[in-house]
Image (cartoon, rainbow, N blue to C red):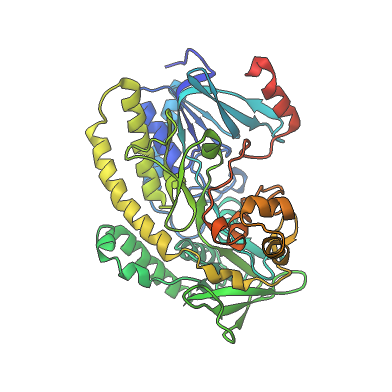
Amino acid sequence: MPHHDPDRAEVAVVGAGPAGLAAAVTAADAGLDVLLIDAADAPGGQYYRAPAPGLGTVRPGAPLHGRGTFTALTARLGRHRDTGRVRHLTGHQVWAVTRTGADWTLLALTGPDGGDGAAPRARRLVIATGAVERQLPFPGWTLPGVVGAAGAQAMLKSGLVLPGRRVVVAGSGPLLQAVALSLAGAGARVPALVEAAGYAAYARAPLTLAANPDRLAEGARHRAGLARYGVRMLTHRAVTAVHGTERVEGVTVSRLDRAWRPVPGTGRRIDCDALAVGHGLVPQLDLALGLGCATRTGTDGSAVLEVDARLRTTVPGVWAAGETGGIGGVRLALAEGELAALSVIADVRGGPVPARARALVRRRRRMRGFAGLMGAAHRPGPGWTGWLAPDTEVCRCEEVTAATVRTAVAELGAADTRTAKLLTRAGMGWCQGRTCGFAVRALAGPSGAGAAPDRRPLACPVPLATLARAARPDNA
């Protein structure tokens, strides 16, 4: 049915990935007026990213789990858009959320250059902003041909582009196996999958594994696929140097001890023309932190949002679903999106949560248990900073080297990331520390490693003209 106020909704969902999509259609199924706002042009997030329409082809690489679920969700979304129950704002990058009376105002960038703006309002807010890739610097990581592991998969999904013909996949975390399979399935030669951690930690948690048999089956399928494509899996090893002049020509792979320190004399060269490297994903929390939502440290060492069993954050009127509460995969994101919506519905109607929500709480607890195990198993060890040469750039935006940060700590008294940033400019560039923040915290010492993430007023770069318009009284 049509909306009475085109600029206001009962609930706004930020992010149209698996969690946000599930939240939006579940809320709309119950009759709520929903705003779904996302920076992408199509729903699905990074996991269900599709090739550009002009390419006229299907998704490459290994098949994705839950394809039928995604198809059903997008069909429901389409029906709700047709009736006006859901307004799906694509190409809208939310850069801040402010309180306006009883409503939340979502300030978003639109237009081809981000110069236009929108400011829809909603009584309740579900944050489903997903995750970004965690990168650990090492000598040569800025050389052309080095890409993020998740970035390589995104290139393949959206543009059918391979980063190279002979690609080493390295880092830590289960995502690496999916990336290697996707690249190999698309025609790349993957000589090695280099995993800095190992998988022994999983065997030490048999009850968690038994409660998640689907994850065991998934792991078995990945191993079989890697064997079929001839991909060697090297555990407790890391790429500690990249070789080449104008682009990647090879990498050095070194054995690591339990603390992730390189073992001297174990380096071996593998020839390749590209490196896809990443050390897991970390929650994207800029909007939530700007609202004052509390965080805690997850088992993988990253900050995650503090939520209760019904996915309410510490800020009234704000819920969170999916990777914002810790990296757990698509099945968990879909379940949490639905659970968050059911919690919102109960809040709107002033009644108890339905039985379906109670079942989802149990399912979430089970899957969160495995996510915690996964995070602990692949958490970067403190010795990884031993990979760094003095001239290794830690902050790429501002070209700040490891030696510069270490000097700020040892000689200038920088004991946390904020002081290190003020003294070195590390984290002051375009990415605002999203790429180098983890590394700078580690170099700043124990006090920096466990520090809370920075709270920024802007979740992304914003043109000055947009800020000026937002500051005018008629836009308040």
Q: Position of residue 405 (x, y in %)?
A: 69, 61
| Image vertical order of residue 268 relative to residue 341, above or below | below
Q: Is residue 432 left or right of residue 343?
A: right
Residue extending furthest top? 4
State which quadrant residue 409 falls in: bottom right
Q: Residue drawn at (49%, 71%), measured in percent from left and top?
A: 195
Q: Is residue 90 left or right of residue 391?
A: left
Q: Is residue 58 above or below residue 185?
A: above
- Depth order, front residue of 13/396: 396
| Residue located 69% across and 19% down the image | 472
Q: Between residue 4 and residue 60, name the one nearer to us.
A: 4
Residue 257 visible in image: yes
Image quadrant for the N terminus?
top left
Residue 464 position within the rendered picture, expressed as x and y whole percent measured from the top left = 75, 31
User: Measuring 41% from the left and 50% from the top, which residue is drawn there?
Assistant: 330
The answer to whether residue 118 is above or below residue 266 is above
Question: Quadrant location of residue 271?
Answer: bottom right
Q: Inspect this view and state whether residue 42 appears.
A: no
Pick the quarter of the image with the C terminus.
top right
Q: Position of residue 59 (x, y in %)?
A: 51, 53
